[in-house]
Image: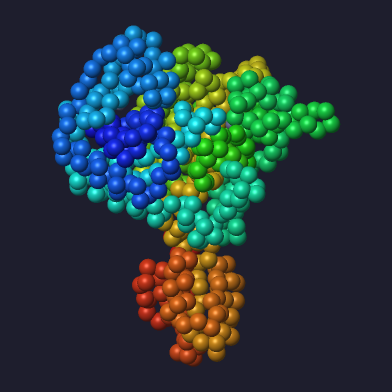
Amino acid sequence: MRHSASHVMAEAVQSIFPDAKFAIGPAIEDGFYYDFDLPRSLTPDDLPIIEKKMSEIIRADLPFTRREITKKEAQKLFASQPYKLELLEEITDDKVGVYEQGSFIDLCRGPHVNSTGDIKAFKLISIAGAYWRGDEHNAMLQRIYGVAFATQKELDEHIARLEEAKKRDHRKLGKELELFVISDEVGNGLIIYGPKGGRIRAVIEEFWRQEHFANGYEILYTPHIGLSKLWQTSGHLDFYQENMYSPIDIEGQEYYLKPMNCPFHILAYKSKMRSYRDLPLRWAELGTVYRYERSGVLLGLLRTRGFTQDDAHIICTPEQVNSEISEVLRFSLHIWHVFGFHKYKVYLSTRPAHSIGTEQMWQDAQEALRKVIDENKLEYEVDEGGGAFYGPKIDLKIEDALGREWQMTTIQFDFNLPERFNMVYTGADGQEHRPYMVHRALLGAWERFFGLLIEHYAGAFPLWLSPVQVKIIPVADRHLEHSRKIIAELKSRGVRVEVDDRSERMNLKIRQAQLEKIPYMLVVGDKEVADNSVSVRRRSGEQLPIQPLASFLETLTAEIANKV
Ligand SMILES: [Zn+2]
Ligand SMILES: [Zn+2]
């Protein structure tokens, strides 16, 4: 039905732009799109006109009919359609299928619904630019996205979800709440954190460090660049170079920006002899890496070129691997709970056709992963053959407030790097053995995690993460002096507090604080000054009873400590 809707949209566009050139129009999740080459740029005002035409075609209940014609006939039929001709070039069969409805005919494998009347509920959503075949050397086409559902109710619900998602868009909120900046003057896909975003990151990093130390990790710091020889040994230059930036020449030697942190951790491991008694080693790093992504796929915080992974490598004996994996998963779920996420889905990816390592290693590793998933009673799906060539992995998808899944945590075995770098430890038998190595990114990339956090909370961060936790609102200028005393007291208890000392009306100041999504507002007037009390409002608009400053402070600091 969705694919049929794209044909109906193409017919509607053809009726409005008789010279339109048609590229491709597939069905996608929840809907469809079609790429057109048109004589002018579309505007949002065009969408209702196209929708109206589509509705007419649907009401007319025109049948979709399939025909098989020879390639030669097709070339004649699509003589004025250069994109269709290009597609035809690549078809090796002599026969091709075409689908026709009303006045529109398309080169198409189908299948389709019987007639246009079977398209029940649809809406056109947006217009975007798209290169022909996704290649920036090709012509820029205009893409119209639409959604289609079996019932109006499902469509309405979907539209409501889209509206909500738009309100929560991290790019929009990032700007409004002054969390981060993306500037053309810096370059695509590189993020600047302003003081508010920076404060949130600092709070989370502090928490992250404490948790890692408490859970048996040590924290490493490693350089941003490394010699080409290092990336040769690691295999990145052979298998990953298209994702890396061009080298930097320093004194005739080539350095690369790091796309991953692993080789540095391995060199730290190899800096001395290791015995089985030293293992397991759990080494974590907030490591900023750089990877080349095509400019067309960059998206706010979600897809960037420079990002910070909350990376860790666990180096252990084969006997320790079960309990280590179990521990990593437990630790991951604990952290996700603290950030307010309670729904996950696990994906287990197993051995692909081309891979390294023995069958025994793969079996052990996959069993370790499966066992841990079972122990934690998690719902999971197996991606048969979906592992990396160097080892199996589990990925954790986190569900947000809108029910969307975000792939965040990854736990990966690696049978490759320990070989390439010849990592060894001395076993109880006095012989050299190869350790197991597991890569783990818990939050994933900080940037992506922050994007998720912003959208999940719609910018209204929990108290413990809010860059400003309390806003003091003096009713008049004569209450400023007392307000400053309150600030000093709150600050001495580690509370992040600001005062709105503008000579504006109180209601305007309250509204401003609500827009900034500050958890608590303290209104200070004559009565509050007289008995050292505070009138407390939450950002939801809820008004709490007037209370002594001391008792508010108790509640506040307890909430912050409990990560509310
Ligand atoms: Zn089609
Ligand atoms: Zn790694």
On screen, residue 132 versus residue 291, left or right, reads left
Quadrant of res 281: top right
Quadrant of res 88: top left
Which is nearer the eye, 304 or 16? Answer: 16
Where residue 411 appears, x then y in whole percent? 49, 32
Query: Which color scheme is applied?
Result: rainbow
Determine whether 167 is above or below 25 in the image: below
Which is nearer the eye, 22 or 242? Answer: 22
Which is nearer the eye, 379 or 423? Answer: 379
Where residue 66 appears, x then y in whole percent? 22, 20
Which is nearer the eye, 542 or 109? Answer: 109
Residue ID at (38%, 21%)? 79
Q: Residue furthest right?
A: 251
Quadrant of res 237: top right
Determine whether 161 is above or below 97 in the image: below
* The C terminus, quarter of image: bottom left
Where residue 449 appears, x then y in whole percent? 49, 46
Q: Quadrant of ligand 1?
A: top left
Asked whether residue 563 appears in the rendered view, the answer is no
Determine whether 109 is above or below 126 in the image: above
Residue ID at (19%, 33%)? 116
Residue ID at (47%, 62%)? 463
